Amino acid sequence: MSIDTAVDTGLGTPGSLKLDAKVPDGPLAEKWDTFKENEKLVNPANKRKFKIIVVGTGLAGASAAATLAELGYQVEAFTFHDSPRRAHSIAAQGGINAAKNYKGDGDSIHRLFYDTIKGGDFRSREANVHRLAQLSVDIIDQMVAQGVPFAREYGGLLDNRSFGGAQVSRTFYARGQTGQQLLLGAYQQLARQVGLGNVKLWTRVEMLDVVVIDGRCAGIVTRDLLTGEIVSHAGHAVVLATGGYGNAFFLSTNAMACNTSAIWRAHRKGAYFANPCYTQIHPTCIPQSDDFQSKLTLMSESLRNDGRVWVPLNADEARPAHEIPEHERDYILERLYPSYGNLAPRDIASRAAKRAVDSGHGVGPLKNGVYLDFSEAIGRLGREVVRERYGNLFEMYERITGENPYGTPMRIYPASHYTMGGLWVDYELMTTIPGLYCAGEANFSDHGANRLGASALMQGLADGYFVLPYTISNYLAEWLNKPIPGTDHEEFRRTELAAGDRFRRFLSIGGTRSPDYFHRELGKIIWDYCGMERTAEGLEKAQSEIPALYDEFSKDLRVTGDGESVNQTLEKAGRVEDFFELGMLMCRDALDREESCGGHFRVEHQSEDGEARRDDENFAHVAAWEWTGDPGKPIRNVEPLTYEVVHLQTRSYK
Amino acid sequence: MSHLANLTLRIWRQSGPADDGRFEDYSIAEISEEASFLELLDILNERLIGEGKDAIVFDHDCREGICGSCSLMIDGQAHGPQLGTATCQLHMRKFESGVTITVEPWRASAFPVIKDLMVDRAPLDRIVEAGGFITAETGGAPDANLILVPKPVAEAAMDAAECIGCGACVAACPNGAANLFTGAKLTHLNVLPQGQAERLGRTEAMVEKMEEYFGSCTNHGECEAACPKSISIDVIAVMNADYLKAKFKNRRLLART
């Protein structure tokens, strides 16, 4: 499939580069086999001649690095943590989807494919999603062989549970720590390759930039976080598996160090950034308790199976929850979405909670949450059953808030959780820079405008284990026995110098405010204007407020310490600067997408009863943004989404 | 919302591995009970930056008790006073007004201090690299349900697999031993049917790598009490039993005698 971006969309100047998604021909269900039949291979003896750089060691990065090393490539893996096991994949709670149909409840590859497309509000690329559903079954086999202790039935077979947005039970899980167990599986497989000497592992090293020479990605430039040393690394191909950018909002459920810098720096070097406005807000997080708060904690979506969401009918309610009689409560989700009730999808439940709080019905000391009440479930099932199902989550809640959910309803509020947007990649996961690949949450490819629960782990592992190891040889084959530029090439030198200058600049500003201060202020702007509900007016404001704050950042930033030893303040300054430019692009993308879809809700585009209204005629496409050197003037390219199998419908959960 | 008042934080400051290091006192006039311990450090760091001083370096990331990055010795206890809780999930309501709280890095010869409260825990990775895995290269796995794992076995494996690799067990141990960490990984893999083929070789490799870096276990049990995941000291018994078996059955060893 070849798309000429010179189509006039009326939105920005069409770019010069041809966006070719390289989707194989033939029927949808056969495309991946067709690709594998026709791809170029590298024979086993030649694989060791190629060096592949993998940045990030979460699910996608660790599985890719391990598998590529097993195949015989020279692999160098980079993480800014002290160990690959710290990557944020570890925090995923709920589970991983796979179309195994072990329950015999009518699941199939097609059904998982369709649920994912519908969950994404018909804004993802059909061929990628179908391949993801196909590979889901192989992931479970691989992870069980690795020793991941998934939940079991008494007979020893694997157990499944159900999750939002699906009518079958296809979610495999390991207590409430599925992400941890899967990451440890991939990490151990990577550790084996490190021990065997097949992977060179760089820890506490952060990527600062990619290097592009003669139109292909030639390597990366990194900074040693312990010594500040800036070093170049050349390779035949580079894989970025560096996660999402949810921390643009400052407060999110992401880990503190999650950032956009790797993919943003690649974007500045020519990789298109797709759909940055598609961000997921998760409805069940613990509300902010004070201004000093540094991050928000997610409570698993599974709680909504038995918890009922409500707010007091009276906005001035001052009584504690148990003193408010039934007829003075508003069970918002049950009232608005009678058929799905408290299990309405994430984007829909989040907006309902926001509207309740915005209209003054919020609960808690700051009136910034809604109740998630288990008293009915405790009455129906008994305390013991509730403890069995949710005991660990109740304990976590109590540890953080000091309140006991068995007696007092939980308070929850939506928070930034996942980003569907990311670097544009073709079917082979290659960005618009030849030789530069992007995998996992960092790319945009599979979740459209909204991701279903238990699908992030699936995508990370599919990309790393089963897609990249096939597609990367298709590119490398043509480079066999051809020389590539080494780190002595002047472009590497130039990039190193520029990166070093940037850090020296942060140290020399000598203002009065810390990087965290600016991050918090920037996050407020992005959350207010590009959060759960967006308006043209707000997004226009963001277009001027972000540059104004950036101006202050560049004059008033204070970074103490030096650049030659561990300096977390300095690391943070670089990441915050990249969030500024990304924030501009998120707001611009949200402004230009004149429709509501999935996590992107434009107030101007809603039905009479407040539901999202898509515009398939004008916006059934991917917006892939091109860097021009001016963060205020990016170029919008489009990749039309053509559906061979799926029929576009209104997504309804009423 | 209630607050604590007049706290003193006595924090270990060390500019690098070569520096001797020293305690420095910081007074905190007021802090909300709702703040987590790491947020207290965030607030202090903001103040230090405002005063033009270097921020206190400490490892942290997920702040949900799962990544294992955070690693503080608080009043002599690894991860502080609350049982089964990592530092990041410890909240100020567990403390009282007017007290002095001493904060140190992990103290163990295998974990050299990098700066302030940050230490190098790489030896834990070396133990995993030596054998903490099941060899199953990508692509060759049979259907997942062909391997039956009895529920109690899966549960026992999961209990051990919950280890977050923070190193609190080492820091709490008077000998600086890593037996709880190594035993947990071995128990996870050694009880599962998938782990049987490499069971003895894995045990030998991991135990001997562990001994290159860490002290020996003398059954104090401090590790279990410090573990934020409350992993049972039983995993050390499983490891010792398997190590003994490995020594008897090791063919290379038999061939030598």
Image (spheres, coloured by chain):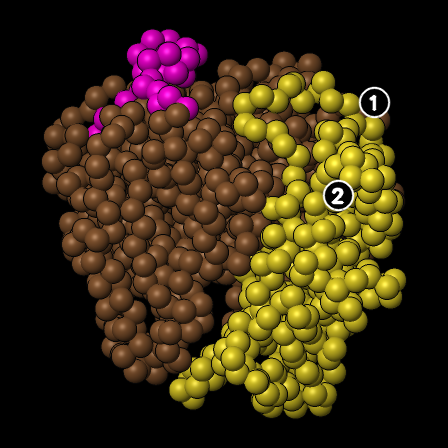
Chain colours: A brown, B yellow
Residue A238 located left or right of residue A365: left
**Against A222, is A111 above or below?**
above
Residue A68 located left or right of residue A603: right
- Write the residue at 22% across / 32% down: A482
Q: Nearer the viewer, residue B180 or A630?
A: B180
Name the residue carrying label 2.
Answer: B203
Can residue B66 be seen here? The reply is no
* Subunit under mark 1: A
Name which residue type carries label 2: Thr
- Residue B48 lies, in percent from the top left, at 47, 84
| Magenta region, residue range | A19-44
Mark 1–mark 2 Cα distance, whole angstroms, equals: 28 Å
For the N terminus of chain A, the image quarter is top left
Name which residue type carries label 1: Gly
Badge 1 crowding class, 10 Å Cα cut-off, few under 14, some 14 to 19, many 20 or more, is few
- Residue A521 lies, in percent from the top left, at 38, 68
- Write the residue at 56% across / 44% down: A195
Q: Nearer the viewer, residue A457 or A38?
A: A38
* Subunit under mark 2: B
Residue A315 colored in magenta in the image: no
- Residue A211 lies, in percent from the top left, at 24, 49
What kind of element bears circle 2? helix
Name the residue carrying label 1.
Answer: A155
Which disc number belongs to residue A343?
none
Q: Quadrant of residue B5?
A: bottom right
- Write the residue at 27% across / 73% down: A504
For the C terminus of chain A, the image quarter is top right
Residue A37 colored in magenta in the image: yes
- Write the residue at 47% across / 43% down: A199
**Against B175, is A283 above or below?**
above
